[in-house]
Amino acid sequence: MVIHVVRPGDTPYNLAREYGVPLSFLLTDNGLEPSDTLVVGQALVIQFPERTHTVRPGETLDAIARQYGVSLRQLYRNNPILGGRPLLYPDLTLVLSYRGTKEGTLSVNGYAYPYIDKSLLQATLPYLTFLTPFTYGFTPTGALVPLDDEVLIAMALQAGTAPLMHLSTLTEEGGFSNDLAHIALTDLTVQNTLIDQIQRTLEEKGYRGLDVDFEYVFPEDAGAYAAFIRRLAARLNPLGYPVIVALAPKTSATQQGLLYEGHDFGALGAAANEVLLMTYEWGYTYGPPMAVAPLPNVRQVVEYALTEMPAAKIWLGVPNYGYDWPLPFIRGETKARSISSVQAVELARQHGSEIQYDERAQSPWFRYTDAAGVVHEVWFEDARSIRAKLALIPEYGLRGAGYWNVMRPFPQNWRVLNGLYQIRDL
């Protein structure tokens, strides 16, 4: 696999000839249409098929997988044109394998709201070890707030992806409630009700584990939070359910701030089976323009976490989004809009912008001027930035990657992931 950075005059056709790959593959791998104009500075994934199979009339994907000893999920990963569906036609070229050595093995988790586009989800599931529908809340009495998750669970299980139940203190107003967390963590009657309902939901719906995300926990509740996770693990682990806990991106045990002080890395890391480091949102809606997940910041969080828990417990959080800020940035007034990586490149194309790459942050960015004369600055993810983040997983021996979230298309991400790593299947 090669990541090509577009030069002036590059076209998909010329690049396909330059690298000796089918044009159709280059377009599909990068989510391009034949008529798309490339953007100078745009990153493109170039993959080199090693073994292929041409579909004959009457053949099925199952039969082809058995013939070559390749798993059905791997065939889907190697052939995004299928969209996760076994729809074949004669003379279709299927890739059995690509040239190149894998850089490691990892697990992959993706978060999704129930209203995710189902075609997008179908195409994404082969790349996911786990799918986590977002989110179950709960009331002050400990009763779970229902989630319309049946379709997502069924699709995940059908695709060989394990569904994880997600529990959070998110309220209907869209914010995380530290008051609600406090009730659940300190009132044992409420906590017992909540744990009973969690177990019942896991068993009734076919979930394979629990992911807990209490954010902005009061500092004085840090110990109670770890105790709650220990109770969950003690109840659920004997039944075969692992307990995962999401952690704020701390860089030291003494880091101040409501986001950080309620998360005791050592205690939570010891209580949970695994943890997710929420290593994103340095660039955020109300902050100044910058990378969402600058690599030095991400690395610093990982290195602190490793002083508190084993590497094999840690999932690295990976963002699947960027932000578009109007300039000048005025704190308290400026609000960035969240966009996908595909939208970011399209914005650069529409406005004739050249995409830059910040080598320190390991993140692409550009500026454009809208029709009203307002200058904007955009930071997003591309194949280069994703490759840099994923490389931290084998470097530090981490468990895998957790994507927030898989609601938006990002073809390059899955090509990089599949091209460089062996994805764990359960």
Image: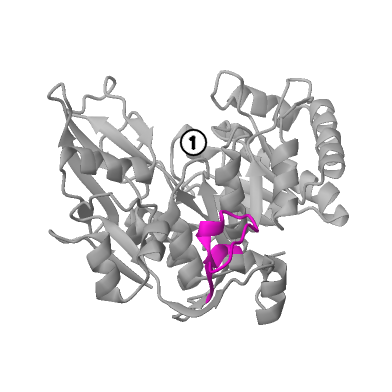
Q: How is the image coloured?
A: one colour
Q: Name the image quarter holding residue 237.
A: bottom right
In which quadrant of the rendered image does the C terminus lie? bottom right
* For residue 75, above or below residue 329: below
Q: Name the image quarter holding residue 73.
A: bottom right
Label 1 Cα crowd, 10 Å radius (few <14 / some 14-19 / many 20+): some
Disc 1 marks a residue whose amino acid type is Leu
Q: From the viewer's perspective, is 31 left or right of 367? A: right
Depth check: 332 or 158 in front? Answer: 158
Depth check: 407 or 258 in front? Answer: 407
Q: Secondary structure at mark 1?
A: helix
Mark 1 lies on residue:
259
Instruction: Please state the horizontal and vertical placement of residue 219, each as a whole percent of the image.
Output: 56, 34
In which quadrant of the rendered image does the N terminus lie? bottom left
Q: Name the image quarter holding residue 274.
A: bottom right
Q: Is residue 345 magenta?
A: no
Instruction: Please state the horizontal and vertical placement of residue 191, each as a whole percent of the image.
Output: 79, 31
Q: From the viewer's perspective, is 354 left or right of 313? A: left
Q: Is residue 87 magenta?
A: yes
* For residue 328, above or below residue 109: above
Q: Is residue 267 visible to us here?
A: no
How many numbered callouts?
1
Q: Is residue 86 visible to us here?
A: yes
Instruction: Please state the horizontal and vertical placement of residue 392, each as a whole percent of the image.
Output: 44, 65
**Which range is magenta?**
76-96
User: Which residue sits at x=48%, y=64%?
Assistant: 417
Instruction: Please state the horizontal and vertical placement of residue 60, each as a whole percent of the image.
Output: 69, 66
